[in-house]
Image: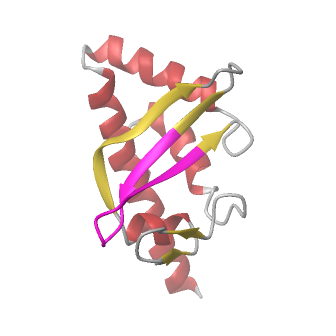
């Protein structure tokens, strides 16, 4: 099934999938309705993507991070902040996204959307495989 993924994306997708149970990020609680998402696969499966799903930021201390936005079933926007501590290839990831954008002549937002869709599918498929193996 790995052939269904852009080969340039795959190592980054696999690393995102390992975030799964990161205790700094999860459980994630919606401040509006109180729903709790126990881990990354649970969060992806039980929320909806937003158009601006992944965005790169650099704060005033010049620390790079990435925000992932999803929508809770109550309608609230949820955000997860990824840093190099959570995702060591963050610089390399955004560099790859930029190169893919230039090589394919597509806007960065479109490439990010494609990555996000493939990453979410990979994480959910592997979650389903793990639950079948248990």
**Residue shown at 60% from the left, 24% from the top:** 92
Q: What colour scheme was applied to this rendering of the protein? A: secondary structure
Dominant SS type (magenta):
strand
Q: Nearer the viewer, residue 38 or 73?
A: 73
**Which residue lies at the image location 31% right of the left edge and 72% below the top edge?**
73
Residue 84 appearing in the image: yes
Q: Is residue 118 left or right of residue 38?
A: left
Residue lying at the far bottom of the rendered structure: 134
Q: Quadrant of the C terminus?
A: bottom right
Confirm whether the magenta stretch covers residue 3: no
Residue at 48% over, 72% down: 42
Number of marks in the image? 0
Which quarter of the image is occupied by the N terminus? bottom left
Q: Is residue 76 magenta?
A: yes
Tell whether 69 sits left or right of 41. Answer: left
- Tell me the magenta residue range: 67-81
Residue 116 is situated, as x and y percent measured from the top left of the image, at: 38, 45
Q: Position of residue 124 (x, y in %)?
A: 43, 66
From the top left corner, tell me how far across and down residue 22 is, in percent: 69, 61
Horizontal arrangement in the rendering, residue 37 relative to residue 78 (left or right): right
Compared with residue 49, is residue 36 higher up or lower down, i.e. above or below? Answer: below
Near-viewer residue (101 or 5): 101
Is residue 46 found left or right of 89 in the rendered image? left
**Which residue is more in the foreground, 99 or 84?**
84
Residue drawn at (40%, 55%) of the image: 120
Residue 128 position (above or below residue 14):
below
> Quadrant location of residue 100?
top left
């Amino acid at each position: 099934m790995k052939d269904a993924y852009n080969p340039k994306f795959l190592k980054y997708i696999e690393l995102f999938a390992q975030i799964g149970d990161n205790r700094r990020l999860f459980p994630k609680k919606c401040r509006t309705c109180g729903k709790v998402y126990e881990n990354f696969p649970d969060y992806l499966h039980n929320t909806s993507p937003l158009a601006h799903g992944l965005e790169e930021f650099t704060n005033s201390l010049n620390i790079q991070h990435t925000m992932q936005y999803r929508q809770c079933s109550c309608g609230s926007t949820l955000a997860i902040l990824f840093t190099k501590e959570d995702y060591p290839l963050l610089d390399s990831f955004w560099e790859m996204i930029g190169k893919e954008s230039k090589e394919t002549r597509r806007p960065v937002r479109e490439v990010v959307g494609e990555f996000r869709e493939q990453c979410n599918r990979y994480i959910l498929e592997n979650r389903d495989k793990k639950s079948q193996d248990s």
